[in-house]
Image: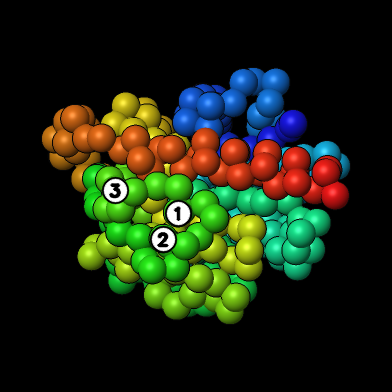
Amino acid sequence: MTFVLLCPRRGEEVLAAEYQDFLRFAQLSEHELEQRALDTPEATLGDMTGVTGVFIGGSPFTITDPYDEHWQDAVSRKLVDFITSQVEAGEEGIPIFAACYGTAMVAHYLGGKVNASYSETPGVSTAFLTDAGRRDPLTSRITSPFRVMTGHKDSVVELPPNATLLATSPQCPTQMYRLGDTMWASQFHPEMDGDAITRRLSFYEEDGYVDPQKLAATYAAFKGHDTSVSNSLLKHFADFCRERAAARASR
């Protein structure tokens, strides 16, 4: 079974780091997970024939303060068109999990509302499943509350139609939601623990996520937190995709 990681970002080193993070926490091998960089406005998502599940990684893109408006809009529209097509396909669609930027992207382009009211500086937060989250086919596999790695400028203040809130936190009311039946978006980073977020932020130290005078203290604060529950969502998603593919094959 094949999984695809779509990465709307540039830079060989950060792409390599993100790929390793997803491999680690989804517990996939390199021959099971193909990374595709969406690093130009012309980049395509590629052939999805035979793909079992799709991850969408993080990005320097932001809705409230576009990173590169032409590139961001071109790539975002392709991703949203793909997501919409798969959700509308129902049982025949490919399951999708989007981390961080995808949460705001989907809400913005599909009728929700995004602003910076609940932005979070990079750090550790505690998230809680909603009642719907406790019944969801993916998030029902984890315990609540759970610790998460966060760091974002955008925040979803109104979900798009056909979306269900799955997890929330005092700092950011929309931490995770499901679109339709088979697309999930998390504001937090399930692919990161303390070491991973330190490595990721090192590529963006001049982009305003962290006060340059507080870098050392910020990195130190990431240490010693157990984010294994949120990290396990990626493996649970991969398991869900395999189970779904097996059920379809047996029909």
In the picture provided, is 46 more to the left or to the right than 26? right
State the image coordinates of residue 114 (x, y, percent, origin top left).
Answer: 45, 72
Residue under label 2: 134
How far is disc 1 from disc 3 in space, using C-alphas? 13 Å
Identified by mark 1, the residue type is Ser
How far is disc 1 from disc 2 in space, using C-alphas? 5 Å
Q: Quadrant of residue 245?
A: top right
Identified by mark 2, the residue type is Arg
Q: Nearer the viewer, mark 2 or mark 3?
A: 2
Eyeballing the image, is 121 above or below 9?
below
* Of 76 and 90, the residue lying toward us: 90
* Of 216 and 248, the residue lying toward us: 248
Contact, mark 1 vs mark 3 (Cβ under 8 Å): no
Q: Residues within 10 Å of mark 1 (few under 14, many from 20)?
A: some
Residue under label 3: 146
Residue under label 1: 140
Contact, mark 1 vs mark 2 (Cβ under 8 Å): yes
Residue at x-position 49% and y-position 25%: 24
Could you say which disc has been placed on residue 114 in the image? none
